[in-house]
Image (cartoon, rainbow, N blue to C red):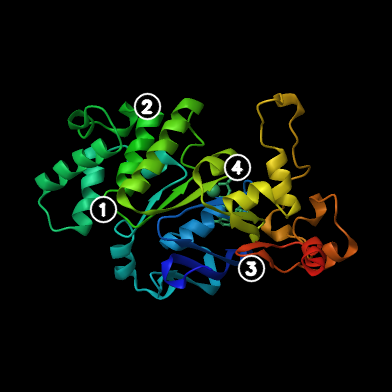
Amino acid sequence: MENESTKLLEIRDLVLGFNIEGETVNVIDNVSFSINEGQIVGLVGESGCGKSITSLSVMRLLPRNAVISKGEILYQGKNLLESAEDEIIKIRGKELGMIFQEPMTSLNPVYTIGDQISEIILLHSQVSKKEALDMAIEKLKLVSIPSPEKVVRQYPHELSGGMRQRVMIAMAMACDPKVLIADEPTTALDVTIQAQILDLIRDLKDRTKSSVLLITHDLGVVAEMCDYVVVMYAGHVVEEADVFSIFENPRHPYTIGLLRSLPTLNEDRERLHTIDGTVPAPKDFPKGCRFAPRCGKATEQCLNEVPPLTSINGTHRARCFSITEKVGDA
Ligand SMILES: Nc1ncnc2c1ncn2[C@@H]1O[C@H](COP(=O)(O)OP(=O)(O)OP(=O)(O)O)[C@@H](O)[C@H]1O
Ligand SMILES: [Mg+2]
């Protein structure tokens, strides 16, 4: 049974919308999940499912037109949504570190790498500029950047994509956060560099005993990295379970679809399955199950009613009417 006290970060019933031309359109709907100490949790789903917005809510870095109408984000039991801005500034970077989806937009082109890392250190610790720069060099060593003494004097454009991503990780880890949120940390990189960055994240997590929320649309990455998986579709959590159950006993047709589109060694690319259709825009979310229009098994009920998240086994839950029957049978 899961121990409540090991929950480090918990998102509870989050409902979030965007104000568009005077109207609020909900994008995240009753999303709940938690991250335990030492865990790597994967947040998975296609583009537009609400992964980044969920993580930006945790960091309290939402766009101006975002409106949270319900829910709590508990970090060590404290609701971050009720924390004052100065408290959040202390927590952000220090307790919760984030690698953003677009590295070039979060690295400032006019400052050196050393300035950018030491700025974060100076914000959270009482050290001199010189000490902060030395600490920045240490952080670059931690992420295996060669010649860190040279790199601290360089500007972002002087580094390769892989090295920039390492710098981003060094920035996120600058103050030894307890939770690292990594939003698609490898999407923009080529395959060999991807593997190195994933190894680095796992290694850092082990060494610093932190937890990771890893956002990705790639179930291959999930298989390699994660302990626990939360699958999102159109602003809903549609399935969650430990990584073994997700791969061995997926229950939501969306998860099954994502798994079928995963390349396997004995299958060539041409024969890969894809899920027909696309994620609807929030203003066009269907009234029943949001996946129903793309689901081969959808019934009249699926088109008209939202299925509840149903318990399958332990923490394994899925939002699909077909499960209610099977659980009932068991
Ligand atoms: N500032 C905004 N105003 C209105 N809608 C927004 C805004 N930012 C994001 N959205 C919408 O919120 C939804 C969720 O976006 P989000 O960026 O969280 O998706 P994602 O799952 O991270 O996708 P991707 O895999 O492409 O990064 C999308 O429909 C997006 O268009
Ligand atoms: Mg995103």
Which label belongs to residue 23?
3
Q: Which residue is mark 4?
A: 219
Asked if the residue at tag 1 contacts the one at tag 3, i.e. Cβ–Cβ closer than 8 Å, the answer is: no
Q: Amino acid at mark 4?
A: Leu
Question: What's the CA distance linking mark 1 and mark 4?
Answer: 30 Å
Name the N-terminal-most of marks 4 and 3. 3
Which dot, 4 or 3, sits closer to the camera? 4
Q: Which residue is mark 1?
A: 175
* Residue 118 seen: yes
**SS at circle 2:** loop
- The percent coordinates of residue 167 (x first, y second) are 32, 38
**SS at circle 1:** loop
Q: Which residue is mark 2?
A: 160
Residue 188 vs 126, above or below: the answer is above
Name the N-terminal-most of marks 2 and 3. 3
Question: Residue at left 47%, top 26%?
Answer: 192
Task: Judge the density around disc 1: few (<14), some (14-19), many (≥20) Cα neighbours within 10 Å.
Answer: many
Which dot, 3 or 1, sits closer to the camera? 1
Question: What's the CA distance linking mark 4 and mark 3?
Answer: 35 Å
